[in-house]
Image: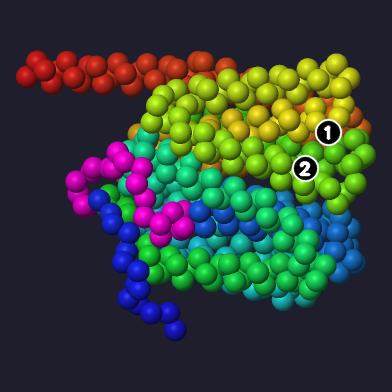
Amino acid sequence: MMPTTPVIPPIAILPPGTGGRASSAAIAPSLLFLLVAFIGLQPFSTDMYLATLPALTDAFATTPAAVQLTLSVFMAGFAGAQLIAGPLSDRFGRRPVALWGLSLYTIASFAGALAPSLPVLIFARLIQAFGVCCTIVCSRAIVRDRYDVTAGAQVMARALTWMSLVPIVGPILGAFLLTAFGWRSNFVVMVLGGTMVLAGTWRWLPETNHERDPHATDPGPLIANYLRIARSSQFWAFTLMATLSYGALFSFISGSSFVVIRVLGIAPQYFGFAFAFIVSGYLVGTWLTRWMLPIVGLYGSLYRGALLSCASGAVMAALALAGVHSLAALLLPMAGVMIAHAIVQSCAQVGAAGPFPRNAGAAVALFGFVMTLTAALIGTWIGASHDGTVRPLTLTIGALTLCVALTAATLVRRTQAQGEAAAAGGATSGGAR
C-alpha cells in the first residue's frame, strides 16, 4: 500500500495568491525527475515499441497496415485528449490530473501486455495515449505555474536534455526485450515504468496551480477560453514556429526508415544507430538552449534556432537536388535540424502559454493539439509522396525549416516588438504617476 506521507519533502512552491513566478531556473531534483518522466512517457511508449511491430503481424496473423493502427490510434488519441486534459488541470489542478493520467497509462499498459487480440491492443494503446497526454500537458503547465517565461524555458530545456536519452535507449531496449522475452515484455516494462512514475508523483508533486478556474471545463467557458487563446497573436507566433519545427522532425521519423534502408541500402540492424545519432543532436540542442538563454534571452535563442534550422534544411535539400545521396548527406544536416528543434521547442512551448497564467493548461493543450495534428498530416504526406528517392523527404524538411525562419522573422519578431512596446508604455505610465 502506498504511504500517504512523503519520504522526501515536497518540492517548494510559490506562495498561493501572490501571482509571482520564479525568475531563477533552480529546480529540485525530485521535480526535475517528474518533469523528465512526464515528458518522456510518450517516446518511451512509442520508440521502445517500434521494434515489436513486425512480431505483432505474426502474433495476431494480420497485416502490417492493421498493426500500424496501434501507432496511428495512439497519435490521434494523444492529439485529441489534450483539449480535455488541459482544462481539467486548470479546474482541478495539475496533481490530480497527473495522477489519474498515470493510473490510466499503467492500467492500459497492463491490458496491452495481456491483450488476446489486435483490437484489444489497439484500444489499450488509445487509453495509453490518454494517460500520456495528461502527463505532458501537466508538465508544461507546471513549468508555467512556477517560473517566468525565460526561467521556464531553461527548466524545460534541462528536462528535455534528460528526456532525450529515452529515444536513444528506447529502440535498443525494445529490440532486446523482443528477442529475449517476446513482444509482451515491452508492455510489462511500460507497466513498471508507469507504476514508478505514479509512486513518485504521489510522493513528491504538490499542487502548483493556485489560480484554478472552476468553470474551465464548462462547455461555454471552455469554448470561450479556447477562442480567447486562439485570438492571441503571441500564442500563434510561438505555436506555429514549434509546429513547423516539429513537422520537420516528424517528417524524418515517418520517412527515414524507408530512405535509409531501402533507398540508401543500409542494413536494418544499423538503422537504430542512425536514429540515435539524430537524437544526439537534440541532446546537444537542449544543452545549447540552457547556455544561450541567460546570455541572449528567449527571443535571441529562438532566432538563432530558426537560423540554424533553415540553414540545415537548406543544405539537406541542396545536397539532394545536386544528386548527393548518401547517409552523411542525410544525417549531418538532420542533426542540425534536431539541434535547432530542441532550441525552438524549449522556448516556444513556454512562450505560447505565457499570456495565460489562469488557463495555462488549456493553452498548452491547444499548443500540443495543433503541433501533433499537423505532424500527423505531414507524416501522411511523407508516406504518400515517397517515390523511391531521397527527394520527397529532404525537400519537405527543407521547406518546413524555411517556414520556421520566416515565422521567426515575421510573427515572432512582431510579438517581441509588441511586448517591448507594452513594457515601455507601462514604465512610462508608472513614471507619470
Find residue 333 and report its horizontal and vertical position in percent.
Answer: 72, 27
Q: Residues within 10 Å of mark 1 (few under 14, many from 20)?
A: some
Which residue is disc 1 drawn over? 327
When the figure is inspected, residue 152 is found, relative to residue 60, above or below; the finding is: above
Proximity of marks 2 and 1: CB atoms separated by less than 8 Å: yes
Q: Is residue 102 left or right of residue 155?
A: right
Regarding mark 2 in the picture, which secondary structure is present there?
helix
Can I make out residue 152 in this image? Answer: yes
Q: How many numbered marks are there?
A: 2
What residue is rendered at 65% in x and 69% in y? 189
The quarter of the picture where the C terminus appears is: top left
Nearest the viewer among 308 and 104 is 308
Task: Answer whether residue 95 is magenta in the image.
Answer: no
Residue identified by numbered label 2:
274
Q: Looking at numbered disc 1 in the image, what kind of residue is underneath it? A: Leu
Q: Magenta segment, which residues?
A: 15-35
Does the rendering let one see residue 232?
A: no
Residue 375 appears left or right of 229: right
Residue 372: assigned label: none
> What amino acid is labelled 2 in the image?
Ala
| Percent x, y of residue 376 | 68, 41
